[in-house]
Amino acid sequence: MLDIGSEKIPLCSGVSRRSFLTLGSAGMAALSLPGIFRLEASGAVNPSAQKIRNCITIFLVGSPGHIDTWDMKPDAPEEIRGKFKPIATAATGIRICEHFPLMARMMNKVALIRSLHHRTGATHENGQRWMMTGHDFNADSIKPHIGSVVSRAFGQKGELPANIILPGPIGNTGSGSLHGQTAGPLGSGHEPFFLNSDPADKAFKILDLEAPQGYNASRLDSRKQLLGKLDALQRGQESASTKMHDSAYERAFRLLTSPTAKAAFDLSKENDKLRDRYGRNTFGQSCLMGRRMIENGVRFVTINHFDTVFNLSCWDMHADGGGLNNTYLDYERHLCPQFDIGFTALIEDLEQRGMLQDTVVAVLSEFGRTPRVNGRGGRDHYPNAWTNFLVGGNIKGGQVIGSTDKTGSAPNDNPIEPPQILASIYHAMGVNLDTTMIPGPGDRPVRLVEAEPIQQLFS
Amino acid sequence: MRSVFFFYPVFALGLACGLLWPQPVDAFQSPQLQGPLVVSPATLELTHLREPKSIQIMGTTADGYSVDLSGKAQFSLTDAKLARLDSPWVFPLANGIGNVVVKVAGQTVEIPLKVNLPKEEPKLSFVHEVMPVLSRGGCNSGACHGYSLGKNGFKLTLRGADPIPDYFSLVREFQGRRLTIQAPEKSLVVTKATGEVAHEGGARFPKGSLSESILVNWIKQGAPDDTSDTNALLRVRMVPARLVLRPGQNHRLQLLADYTDGTTRDVTRLGIFSINNDFFAQVSELGLVSAQERGETAVVARFERSFASTGVLVLDAGKGFTPSPAPTHLIDKAIVEKLNQLKIQPSGLATDEEFLRRLHVDLIGIQPTPDEVRSFLASRDKQKREKTIDALFERPEFVDQWSLKWGDLLQNSRNSASSPGVYLFREYIRSAVASNLRIDEFAKQLLTARGGFQEDPANVFFTISKDTNETVERVTQVFCGVRMLCARCHPHPLENWTQADYFGLASFFSQVSTPQDSRLQNVPNAKMTRLNLKTGFSTNPRTGKLQPPKFLGGDEPKLATTVDRREAYASWLVGPANPFFAKSIVNRFWSYFFHRGIIDPVDDIRSTNPPVNPVLLNALTRQFADNGFDMRKLMRLVVTSEAYQRSSMANEFNKTDEQNFSRMIPRRIPAEALMDGLIQATAVQENFAGAPGGFRAAQLPDGNIENPLLKLFGKPQRMDACECERDNSSNMLQALHFINGKTITGKLQNPAARPALLLRDKKSDPELVAELFLWCLARHPSLQEAQASLAFLNSTPADKRAEAVQDLMWALLNSKDFQMLR
């Protein structure tokens, strides 16, 4: 019953309570049964938790303009409607940008949310924090990435970590380093595992999983055997902490040596046609890698579409003539097709493998872009209205939730804020928001997100 | 750092129909009792037709076990008209005076009985009867209608924090659709709770239960409102307050509630029982304790926002146990007495090598060098442990280690303070540690600081808080070990703190503001601590009224309107009227030398989280105060104890004991000590991005350091005053980094690293192995370890010798004995 704060794992008082879920099955044996039952009762080690769905989040760093993509305003004046035209989609009445022809064909699977907005400043980082954690924080205590929460709540399923971000972290986007892609107070065991390597690159290699230079397999093996011998001699004075250490090493070596784990990261196992279908670029191959991760037991994959907004072609369409010089041309020739191809390949592939019903795919961004095209032909940051979307799992596709006014300036009906999207993702994954809590400031138990799921997504 | 995945418990219910009380099934059949029977209550006064009272009959055996005799007792009445007996309950029938006669264990006890029923049965009380039913049903828990947004349109205050809005929600909201006065059983609130109507929260109590009958009858009476009634709960008590049981033995608890009008209710059927550690004992919903394994825990009962606890000690016969002689050392005396009581034999002393490494890592944050180990081993001085302890206090690393600790606790960080402010505050802390400033003086200086950091670097302490609330929470958590955050928004769920307590504390600090230092406009976060003596008290959001300053669990001091109220707080904080200060410091520092606090978590002191050894904690606290709040004397006392110097090897008696300090429990070395130990072992420096060159990990100004190892091993960001922010757990990503990451392999391959240095010295294989063990693990290899290591070196061809030495060192750094402190 009243366990908060005084909750102790029997005979494991040396282990901090948080550590409990990182113990893994080996460490579990050290716990007394009643302790497990109690945690089970409260949802921590729920065996059926294995059944929660997985999630792939595609994060569009820089943020596409909603009016140029999924919330077009063809009847608005030219300086608002922009250069692109809408096209009909497989879902009656839903029209999206002409540069997403493939997506248009699968629109009956997609639920668009057109009334998103947030009330904090128009920096990329504000939007990233909102959409990656469901919380606004800056100097306040850091909130965990949604994948870290899932890792913490439901643990690791197979050999791979539960929460993976690819290809790498979000770097400089202008205003500080808090991008909402850390485990925050949940501890380093739940930090996102960044691949930090480009899956489209032939030299793709994951640091810490690959042996350092100059080490061949036999040297690694003999080292490992020596460690095994020495560790065995050091046994005999076990505590919860030493068992946790053993379990961590056991899992690390399983990951390092298992052929399946190694194969999971090997895109050459895919046939060339499929690799082509995803697009032979970082984003496309990241989507493919994302699918492979889910297949191999990762619970939460985040694909960062770009790691910065400076000096590259990305969604941040300021057209400023300098380091932020993205324009309609970038959208038309490069960004929209790349997204359209990679995203639809992923959905198709998941569906063909029967994985889509168990995988929620969320396409998220930081904000929308100004309704009025600026003097240089670009659009600037606009958190007052934007569109994101969800596919897969138990999400009902072919629908639009909320809308914006005639000029795309503000939500018109059913305004949605970022925490509701996070609550919806948790809900779509099957996470019970009423019984699952994480430690907040001062160890106070807090809900994962202060919002309820958007019911319309599921009906 | 942060500890469990937390869950608001969804209270399991199913209070079996009303008055059934499980009969204790007892493994303790015919005890030899000693001394008189204890009867609770001593006299029985029944003043309420709805409220029977229970009788507890308790005895004690010659060897100190508690025995619950109520189940075996035969009850009778001298006047059968007065009451009905349903052992152990007595139900009133008619007014009069008589006795309840109890026969048990060959003794007869008479309990005076007075039945004094009012002419008219009083109406049911919303506050004292209905709300406890809602609490017991879990209806107002955080996961259900107590959630800040309510559930399905129905919101209650969290855990029954406030009767007035709860009454409104239940009775008035939506034109009273939740209640059906004409057909009370059909009321939505009843049918939802009993599961007759679909309810997302499931059935909370069955039809025909006491809970249901209270709810239905209250509605039947027209849902009377007594939220303005002045009769209030004074306290709840549990009888008995302490139990000593054998594994398998059962004992009832009785829960009594005292009210301000002088009445006492038996609320055993309405309270919520829980146990702090159900490995040792379990408690049923009706307060029946069943002992499981040898050890100690506490039952906590909650009723109407108040708590009571009963310590439960589970002991077995302890075959072959012989009590240890009582030592004279203050710590060992308290621990050994407790262990004797628990029939636990402590482990013997740790070896010199084990002791030396433990002492170095704990006291100065780095393991000893091979020379230090060798000279300690070589010394024949009988006082060598004491002498080494004294010498370590003088080491510069001692200042690093404890300044790091205080930097964490006071949250000195560039996340919230300016860079120059952080460095000056760091220096302030370092000089306090170096000069062994009395800790009460240190606290007073911090809490009364003012100005900019140029005048008073201690002012940074205040500027780190976003607002007064954060100051209240930080001050209370760091210097009293009490977590007040919950009470900011609602009564504390596990302690008797309310918003009045919280904002009473806030009023001491409401005169403080922290604007940007106008002389340092261009330095981000360079704030001043400014006092505006005219600022009034803080407002209690629940009452909307100003809350006069009130010490934590203490008085409301009468303060002149224009004084710095922090002065009064600081004096109280370190003075004898405050039960928390010295105790929490002692307890916290204890935990830095053991795997846990005497109260644990160390910054969560509350009546429902009792110490594992109160005698020890009190003795240490007293000694600490007597020694003038001298931190070094406190630490010296701890590390000179046998308890600290014990081996981590368990024996037959203490192998399941992890909370009574009968042996050392191995724990992971904190991030900074691990890093500095690694640097010392490999002889390769680490460059910390974000700090001046040449800093050791223990000297870093804050957590804003880009370093994968420190980050992975849980160096805190200092965003929280909670001790839990430091994460000392082990995980797979750490292991991957140690196995393959560049921190380790990079250092090992360095041409100036230990393996290369040792090879250059052309040592023999056995010497080389011994050196590596000493550098990595601060000890010599055992015979088997040496053999395994030599075999490894011998099995590699001569041209791969350099690699083999690196690999041996790699294996030692990856072995448990490097990352763990035994």
Image: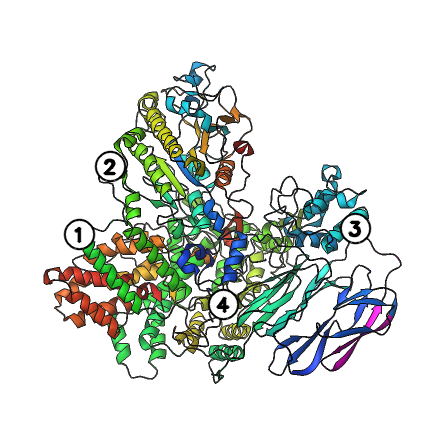
| Labels 4, 2: one chain | no
The amino acid type found where label 4 is placed reads: Asn
Q: Which residue is mark 3?
A: B217
The amino acid type found where label 3 is placed reads: Asn
Q: Is residue A50 above or below residue B448?
A: above
Mark 4 or 2: the one toward you: 2
The residue closer to the viewer here, B154 or B20, is: B20
Q: Is residue B447 visible?
A: no
Determine which of the numbered discs, if any, sits on residue B587 in the image: 4
Q: Which residue is mark 2?
A: A201
B84 sits to left or right of A447: right
Task: Look at the magenta stretch and give its main secondary structure.
Answer: strand
List x then y, in percent, for residue A148: 42, 46
Magenta residues span: B97-124
Identify the secondary structure beneath mark 2.
Answer: loop
The residue closer to the viewer here, B361 or B90, is: B90
Quadrant of the image occupied by residue B550: bottom right
State the CA–CA distance, disc 1 to disc 4.
Answer: 50 Å
State the CA–CA distance, disc 4 to disc 3.
Answer: 49 Å
Chain letter behind tag 2 = A
Identify the secondary structure beneath mark 4.
Answer: helix
List x then y, in percent, for residue A48: 49, 48
Q: Quadrant of the N terminus of chain B?
A: bottom left
Mark 1 or 4: the one toward you: 1
**Which is nearer the N-term, disc 1 or disc 2?**
2
The amino acid type found where label 2 is placed reads: Asp
List x then y, in percent, for residue B231: 77, 57
Whether B107 is among the magenta residues is yes
Q: Residue, x 79% and y 43% (percent of image)?
A: B183
Q: Which residue is mark 1?
A: A214
The amino acid type found where label 1 is placed reads: Gly
